[in-house]
Image (cartoon, coloured by chain):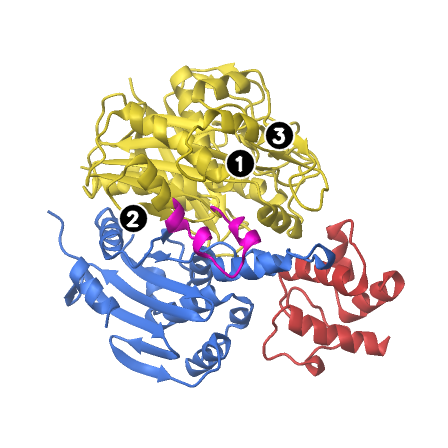
Chain colours: A red, B blue, C yellow
Amino acid sequence: MEALKQELKVKIIEVLNLEDVSAADINDNDALFGDGLGLDSIDALELIVMLDKDYGIKLTDPKEGKNIFASINTMADYITANRTK
Amino acid sequence: MQNDNYITATCRIHNNEMFVDGQSIFKTQAADFAEFSKKAYQHLGISYPKFFKMDNLSKLAFLGAELLLKPEHHQSNTALVFANKSSSLDTDVKYQQSIADKGNYFPSPAVFVYTLPNICVGEISIRHQLKSENSFFIFDAFNANLMCSYANLLIDTQKAHAVLCGWIEYFNEDYRAFLYLVSPNGNTIHNKQSLETAYNQ
Amino acid sequence: MSKPVYIAQTNCITPLGFDVDGNIEQILAKVSGIALHQNLTKSGIPFYAAVVDEHRLNQAFQDARMHFTKLEKMLLLALQPVVTESGIVLNEEVALIFSTTKGNVEKLEENYTNIEPALLSGLAQKMADVVGFKTQPIVISNACVSGIMAVSVAKRLIQAEVYKHVFIVAGDAVTEFVVSGFNSFQAMSDAPCKPYSKNRSGVTLGEAAAAVLVTSDPTNAKVKILGDGSINDANHISGPSRTGEGLFRSVASAMKEAKMIPEQIDYISAHGTATPFNDEMESIAFSRSGLSAAPLNSLKGFYGHTLGASGLLETVIGIESVLRNQLFVSLGYDELGVSEPINIIEENRYKPLIRFLKTASGFGGCNTAVIFEKMN
């Protein structure tokens, strides 16, 4: 799970063009949206694409994204449970 | 007969260099626009992480606006009138590539949103909180005539107090930005000739 | 005091018909142009869209001088009759504005290293040359407000005496490029769109072309253009302002110029794309503007969202509304699903109408509002 969390941090920085943010800056429990990393609605959609592309998970209801992408921890849990790649 | 309007400031960005009112204010070595724009951003001391999510056209427009807009422009109803030749085609091509291969089909919303040229105007509106008139035109080349007429009429009909005009052309690492502020007061009369002179400087 | 400017000729090419009367007939019969299509994109996955029948288009468009794309045929079929019927000699005083979001973007599929065929100025020049314009065409590419922004720009240029007459043609096609993009935004509805409805779930795309003549000559004028505004939200590049700020200010700017109060607006042709956010934002902006009682519709239930064409096509239909004193149903609407009160038109019905407001909003935080008044 630790390796996946690290992988996610690196991916998020790259996919969402988070300049001046390093993996070390992101704590597992930090809020990704809102005040945390300040991600917005387009970022959420990009993460949905990433789930499909890298982990083979198709989100049927995008509203689920709010809970799944709350933090690195919630993302890692969800991916571990649902990945097909 | 309407009073004249004036060009109060100009800037150009081209070939890894930025000019304000004809003076070079920044020049650097850079392998590509991504590197140049990042260095320019740092040189201007900007702190705006969203910059790095923008496409090249928006980054170019953003930098130009950063050179000319001051805090008071937010108060003074400054309109945005931009134009170019290649629309958003630089990003369109990137997006098209992402949907070309049915075996590797993951269209990106972050790329798709930039496949409209007016997004660069939106980015400037957001950055400078300009709730003002805005339009994006496409021409084969910088159209001083139309730009001049349109900026003038916005001021003359009180739809705007000042206008930031821009020719923001970007395609495949070939870029040229020419922006200028038009206002009812100033020294250089805003007309077709002065615009063409400034554009060709 | 600015000289009055009018719209004097109109035309449209849509899935509902290749002339205005034909379109109105279908609208009165509540026939939608939206259908389930199977083979529009390479994935073969069926989706709802409002598409112009290619066979019918090719029967109507008979010009073998050169190759024309489907979009070009639609644009020329819309524009040429407007120019011809106007009787106006195309000289230096006459401009052409072309509104589109993506133009011939499909050319990138063939070869994405050469953008020449996809340049919007090239497309505009081709049409200008075919029809015979003598001035450099003006292209407006400002997301989904392009079609109605063109009317505002035309009126402003005429009042500033830059031109005497301005023809506008607007069009966009349903393409894989756009369909895939809207899908990536989770913005496409599984069923025909339901503007302002509780269970709305996104847009249905459409394609169309529309054309009008904007002129200072009152002969044959259908409506007068009273005021306009195109104000940005300054909020987010894809999500509309939660307070409807840009739309509210655009309407305010148009109303101020027209010297009108909200009660004088007889009908609103709104944007109503049926996304959760757009329709909600519009209800807030209209409510703030004191327009909650004005009969309002979205035509997206008939035409789908025709992007760069929408503002102009829907203006053409709005003009028919006031000329015929006929409110058209906001097709697809069932139960109110926005937080602020607005008065959705639920059935085609007769009502004396004089002034209408056309609005549009789009990606990049743009909004445009224009007010029209029927000629006596």
Could you give the CA–CA distance between mark 3 and mark 1, rounded to whole angstroms?
10 Å
Instruction: State the residue position of label 3.
Output: C34
Image disc number at residue B132:
none
Q: Which residues are magenta?
A: C103-123
The answer to whether residue C231 of the structure is visible from this angle is no
Name the amino acid, label 2: Lys
Q: Residues within 10 Å of mark 3 (few under 14, many from 20)?
A: many
Q: In the image, residue B101 lies at what x, y percent? A: 68, 57
Instruction: State the residue position of label 1.
Output: C207
Q: Secondary structure at mark 2?
A: loop
Image disc number at residue B159:
2
Q: Chain of mark 3?
A: C
Q: As rendered, which of C125 and A62 lies closer to the eye? A: C125
Residue C323 lies in the magenta-colored region? no
Q: Nearer the viewer's eye, disc 3 or disc 2?
A: 3
Establish if C298 lies above or below B174: above
Establish if B59 lies above or below C315: below
Residue C115 lies in the magenta-colored region? yes
Name the amino acid, label 3: Ile
Respond whether the residues carrying marks 3 and 1 are from the same subunit.
Answer: yes
Q: Residues within 10 Å of mark 2 (few under 14, many from 20)?
A: many
Q: Is residue C351 left or right of residue A17?
A: left
Q: Residues within 10 Å of mark 1 (few under 14, many from 20)?
A: many
Q: Chain of mark 2?
A: B
